[in-house]
Amino acid sequence: MKEEYLVEMKNINKNFGAVKALKGVDFIVKKREVVGLLGDNGAGKSTLIKILCGVLKADSGEIFFNNKELSISSPYQAREKGIETVHQELSLVNTMTIARNMFLGKEPIRKVGFFSFLDKETMNREARKVIGDVGIKVRSPDEYVSILSGGERQAIAIGRAMYFDAKLLILDEPLRALSVKEQKNVLDHVNQVRDQGISVIFISHNVYHAYSVTDRFVLLNKGEKQGEILKEDSTPEEIAEFVSSGEKLSKIV
Ligand SMILES: Nc1ncnc2c1ncn2[C@@H]1O[C@H](COP(=O)(O)OP(=O)(O)O)[C@@H](O)[C@H]1O
Ligand SMILES: [Mg+2]
């Protein structure tokens, strides 16, 4: 049922010089679904989602979002459409405050006569709410992002997606380099996001990281789709085995 689809990527190809990063990949995300995008390092996971969120352009292929052709050429345009991405190399700007990071590209403006100002008061007030919602103990929205831990940065980026009512949240290796406690917090936030009706793409090279929050797994191997697995049909051990074998699976959607 096409109406259930939020994202439909068809026959996506991408080369970096001689490297074939993606070879005819089809990828679907349904509404209110958490998809685990799995594969070894270099499988093409980040490339696929960078194409979806406007960081990279595919060499060929089609992308539909909410059943309409998606033609975007920047991450800013993706955010306008409701696609929020937390990249592997985190998408917060270290040299800006937490409040500025939250409103990056969507800054509230206050007009006084002919002049426009950044509405810092609103940014600080709203950022304080988001910090509270995601339950992190940062002292003030005026602090710089550079002082935050990996887990706190993830939480702020996820909180931002919820605040702006995103339709799709993309998390690229969100648990990488986090402590066990921080990992648990991020997984709790993913559940919060899903409860709000937002679809999630959870990228990982480790099925155990994604297993508890994911509904369906899509496996990539060396730039090709290896197959799809519904969580209810498989144990994490079986999925890990498929990932390491690289064998093609019959398709389940
Ligand atoms: N900007 C780039 N320039 C050249 N090669 C790249 C670039 N980005 C990714 N690649 C290559 O494309 C392949 C897929 O990379 P990537 O999508 O980052 O994989 P994954 O996220 O699954 O680890 C790898 O071989 C990687 O080296
Ligand atoms: Mg990657």
Image (cartoon, rainbow, N blue to C red):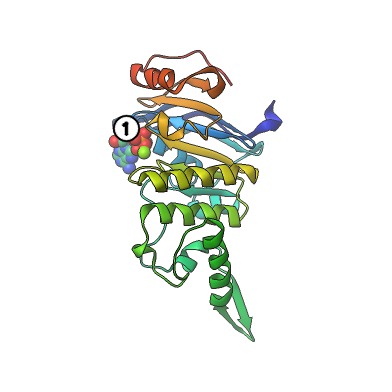
Secondary structure of the residue carrying numbered label 1: loop
Disc 1 Cβ-to-ligand 1 distance below 8 Å = yes
For image coordinates 34% across by 20% down, the residue present is: 244
Query: Horizontal placement of 13 versus 68: left or right?
Result: left
Which of the image's four quarters has the C terminus?
Answer: top right
Query: In the rendered image, which quarter contains the N terminus?
Result: top right
- Percent position (x, y) of residue 176? 35, 42
Ligand 2, by image quadrant, is: top left
> Of all residues shown, which one is farthest toward the bottom?
113
Q: Quadrant of residue 10?
A: top right
Q: Nearer the viewer, residue 39 or 75?
A: 39
Residue under the image location 49 percent in, 51 percent down: 75
Choose top left, top right, bottom left or bottom right for residue 58: top left
Image coordinates of residue 151 in percent, x first then y, are 40, 52
The residue at which mark 1 appears reads as: 41
Residue in the foreground of this view, choosing between 62 and 148: 148
Residue 180 visible in the picture: yes
Image coordinates of residue 237 in percent, x first then y, are 41, 20
Residue closest to the far front? 181
User: What is the total number of numbered labels drawn onto the structure image?
Assistant: 1
Image position of 46 with respect to 39: above or below: below
Q: Is residue 102 above or below residue 239?
A: below
